[in-house]
């Protein structure tokens, strides 16, 4: 097992993790899932949890555990036409054991292809119906003669457990930020492994710095994993204040954020702020389809959890095919996704409401060493940020709202607020009250801040 490069957030380091995990056959249960988490735990302190088969989790039941060792279709000469060891996508995930000789006509209903993409192998599953099948390219299927074939799926489907990985980083408060990643797909580099790699390196970075929130990272099988965690941890779920589902973070498409069911949660505003300032992007409203955000946002929980991707699921031709390979995922895209996720987290950690302690007129910043421009010069970026923070720190507006109104990066506004606080010109509103005001401000149209006309700040920010 390789040692991963220590560079936190390096695209090359994340791509190395993906290369290491790519050959492993993962599914919603089984040894492939466990092996992947063991390797990923070399990046972040992930603890594996096991939930026994048959456990009732809301309307679902934890399924039997599936493991596969080999699978093939061979001709009369023993030549493997389809071989699991060439691509683990060849076997339909959760296929029951099979050993038979069949004609091509008998076999055809069990064979899955993509006629519109004839060179690609599809990814297919049969999780909750005991069945079996193979996936192959349309071109290979078209070349098969009418003959008898030996068919083998060497698998087990038996009582065991569902595994998930958890990394909890305690903060100053028990209020939580949830980062959730589905980790159950086999050799699919973008839809699955990119999210796992970015999440692991985020956990590693956050584990080494002070944290206001407690961060909970979940590496789970899709759908059944989030439902299982929610069913067994309802009290912990009540502490989640913000959340992100991560997936499809390594392709060359522009970044996309899908809002939470609430649509106006702080995480929704934070993601919008980060992506708008980064260039081309897409902001999508919530729909009850996609990844595990639809479980966290189910009406019985309605957690403020959005989804960060590049090209969204189902909207790129490589999705759930053998073309979602190591070449499809780019190191620079991984690094960009990591940086954007970290910027969103920075806002979740540090957005707050301040009170200006000298609100009648502007305080004299020059004698406090905060304003260095000569008279008549245009305000510099940081100095303009000081003025915005002073003017809107009225106990009602959060730093993120001020950053949006000023068309300045949140980090610049946050730095200005810190300097003003250190100079004795601001005080933070009580943390609990601050959070309530900030939440109300983001969701209430009466406090929404309109986009300003062009200003020195807007010009300086470009």
Image (tube, rainbow, N blue to C red):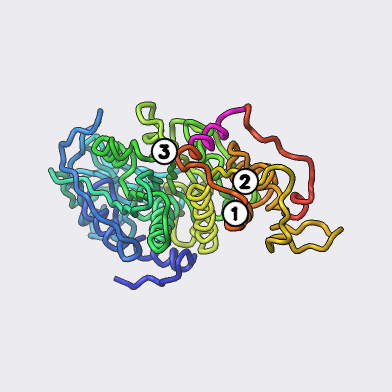
Locate the N terminus and report the quarter of the image it occupies.
bottom left
Query: Disc 3 or 2, which lies upstream in sequence?
Result: 3
Seen from the viewer's position, the closer of residues 395 and 145 is 395
The relative height of residue 312 versus residue 69 in the rendered view (above or below) is above
User: Residue 28 in magenta?
Assistant: no
Q: Which residues are magenta?
A: 436-445
User: Residue 437 in magenta?
Assistant: yes
Seen from the viewer's position, the closer of residues 264 and 142 is 264
Seen from the viewer's position, the closer of residues 356 and 203 is 356
In x, y percent, where is residue 348? 49, 47
Does the rendering let one see residue 75? Answer: no
Q: Which residue is mark 1?
A: 424
Query: Disc 2 or 1, which lies upstream in sequence?
Result: 2
What residue appears at the point 44 percent right and 64 percent down from the top-left corner?
15
For label 1, the SS is: loop
Circle on res. 139: none
Q: Which residue is mark 3?
A: 293
Label 2–label 1 contact, CB within 8 A: yes
Circle on res. 357: 2
Q: Quadrant of residue 108?
A: top left
């Amino acid at each position: 097992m390789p040692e991963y490069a220590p560079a936190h957030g390096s695209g090359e380091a994340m791509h190395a993790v993906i290369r290491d995990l790519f050959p492993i056959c993962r599914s919603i249960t089984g040894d492939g899932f466990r092996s992947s988490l063991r390797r990923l735990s070399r990046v972040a302190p992930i603890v594996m949890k096991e939930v026994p088969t048959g456990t009732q989790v809301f309307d679902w039941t934890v399924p039997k555990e599936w493991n596969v060792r080999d699978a093939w279709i061979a001709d009369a000469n023993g030549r493997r036409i389809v071989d699991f060891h060439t691509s683990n996508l060849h076997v339909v995930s959760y296929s029951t054991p099979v050993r038979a000789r069949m004609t091509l006509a008998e076999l055809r209903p069990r064979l899955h292809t993509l006629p519109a993409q004839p060179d690609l192998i599809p990814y297919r599953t049969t999780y909750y119906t005991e069945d079996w099948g193979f996936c192959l390219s349309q071109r290979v299927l078209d070349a098969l003669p009418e003959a008898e074939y030996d068919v083998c799926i060497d698998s087990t489907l038996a009582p065991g457990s569902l595994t998930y990985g958890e990394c909890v980083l305690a903060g100053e408060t028990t209020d939580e930020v949830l980062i959730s990643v589905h980790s159950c797909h086999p050799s699919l580099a973008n839809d699955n492994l990119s999210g796992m790699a970015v999440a692991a390196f985020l956990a590693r970075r956050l584990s080494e710095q002070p944290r206001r929130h407690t961060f909970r990272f979940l590496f789970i099988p899709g759908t059944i994993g989030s439902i299982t965690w929610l069913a067994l941890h309802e009290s912990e779920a009540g502490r989640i204040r913000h959340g992100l589902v991560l997936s499809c973070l390594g392709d060359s498409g522009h970044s996309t954020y899908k809002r939470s069911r609430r649509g106006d949660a702080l995480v929704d505003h934070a993601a919008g702020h980060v992506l708008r300032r980064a260039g081309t992007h897409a902001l999508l409203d919530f729909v009850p389809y996609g990844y595990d955000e639809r479980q966290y946002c189910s009406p019985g929980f309605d957690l403020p959890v959005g989804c960060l991707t590049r090209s969204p699921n189902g909207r790129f031709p490589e999705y759930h095919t053998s073309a979602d390979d190591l070449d499809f995922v780019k190191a620079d895209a991984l690094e960009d996704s990591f940086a954007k996720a970290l910027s969103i987290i920075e806002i979740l950690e540090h957005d707050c409401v301040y009170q200006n302690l000298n609100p009648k007129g502007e305080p004299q910043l020059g004698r406090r060493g905060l304003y260095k421009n000569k008279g008549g010069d245009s305000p510099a970026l940081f100095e303009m940020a000081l003025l915005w923070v002073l003017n809107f720190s009225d106990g009602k507006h959060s730093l993120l709202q001020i950053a949006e109104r000023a068309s300045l990066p949140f980090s610049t506004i946050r730095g200005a607020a810190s300097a003003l606080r250190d100079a004795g010109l601001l005080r933070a509103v009580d943390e609990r009250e601050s959070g309530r005001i900030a939440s109300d401000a983001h969701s209430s149209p009466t406090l929404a801040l309109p986009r300003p006309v062009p200003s020195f700040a807007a010009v300086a920010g470009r």
